[in-house]
Image: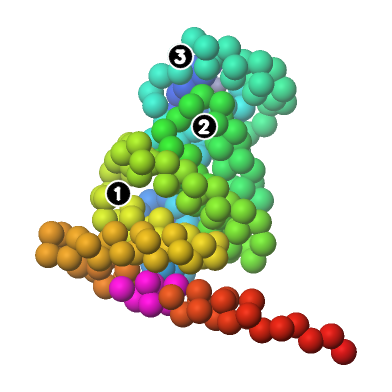
Amino acid sequence: MMDHASALYDKKCSCLHCGTAFTTKRVRSGALAMLKRDSDFCTYYKEQSLNPIRYTVAVCPQCGFAFTDQFAPRLSPAHKKLVAERIAAKWTRKDLGAERSPAEAIAAYKLAIYAAELTGQAHSVKAGLYLRLAWLYRFEGDAEEQRCLQQAVDEYEQSYIHSDYALGDKDMSEVRLLYLIGELMRRVGKYDKAIHYFSKVLAFRGRTIETGMLQMAQDQWAQARDEHKRQQQKREQPTTVD
Ligand SMILES: [Zn+2]
């Protein structure tokens, strides 16, 4: 097992806004021992402080523009002007390129989400940021997770409608995306929509090699249906006041 310091390395970056060269920490994949994975693909490692999602976002220490490898490689002149006014002008120089605490990782994601919204990044890119931020809150037991899951699923739904899902994550297939939307809808309590998306996954039966996704959709569809029923029963029960 590698020690902490050697599990992290410095990755060279160049700021997409101001061109400043800087380094940011990344996790060596060989350093990771996986513990478990949630039904929305949130992955836990033996050493959670080495969870790679803590280091996905690079933050330019000079101007404060925060981005990931999935951002479009160039900013338009109009977007540069916005970044200059709304981000760089308000930034006080600080370095998030060293080892990050959970709070620093969360701060980096908030900066990246703001930058992504401001510069019109693809829905899939924004969705990925919101989902990973939700996971960071989950690790901390913070109720903010729900709000981020809601924003993630809204962006993934847009990503599905606009078919931009391959831009944010090269491993994202249509079947996987449909499953993920269904599962996130279930987690935010939108059971009708969850069931709708899970049935879209199941319609791929016989047309996909991703049979694992079909099985997961089957299981989570059953769970969503049960939770939906319980929710309706609760609503129908008259409330008693003592
Ligand atoms: Zn910069």
Residue 162 or 95: which is nearer the viewer? 162
Quarter of the rendered structure image containing ligand 1: top right
Q: Amino acid at mark 3?
A: Ser
Q: Which residue is mark 3?
A: 76
Please tell me which of labels 3 and 1 falls first in the chain.
3
- Compare residues 65 and 152 and report the one nearer the observer: 152
Return the x and y of residue 168 as percentages of the image width and height. 37, 40
Q: Is residue 109 above or below residue 14?
A: below
Q: How many marks?
A: 3
Residue pictured at 31% horizontal, 64% vertical: 199
What span is colored magenta in the figure? 218-224
Colouring style: rainbow
* Residue bearing mark 1: 172
Image coordinates of residue 101 in percent, x first then y, are 63, 52
Please state if 83 lies on the left or on the right of 201 as rendered: right
Residue 159 sits above or below residue 225 on the image: above
**Is 56 in the magenta?**
no
Looking at marks 2 and 1 on the same chain, the residue that comes earlier in the sequence is marked by 2
State the residue lying farthest toward the right: 242
| The residue carrying mark 3 has its beta carbon less than 8 Å from ligand 1 | no
Q: What secondary structure is found at the residue carrying circle 1? A: loop
Identity, as a three-letter code, of the amino acid under mark 2: Ala
Q: Secondary structure at mark 3?
A: loop
Where's residue 12, x and y in %?
43, 31
Q: Which mark is residue 209?
A: none
Tell me whether the residue at label 3 lies in contact with that at label 1, contact meaning CB atoms closer than 8 angstroms.
no
Please provide percent x and percent y for residue 149: 54, 55
Residue 220 belongs to magenta span: yes
The alpha-carbon separation of the residues under discs 3 and 2 comes to: 13 Å
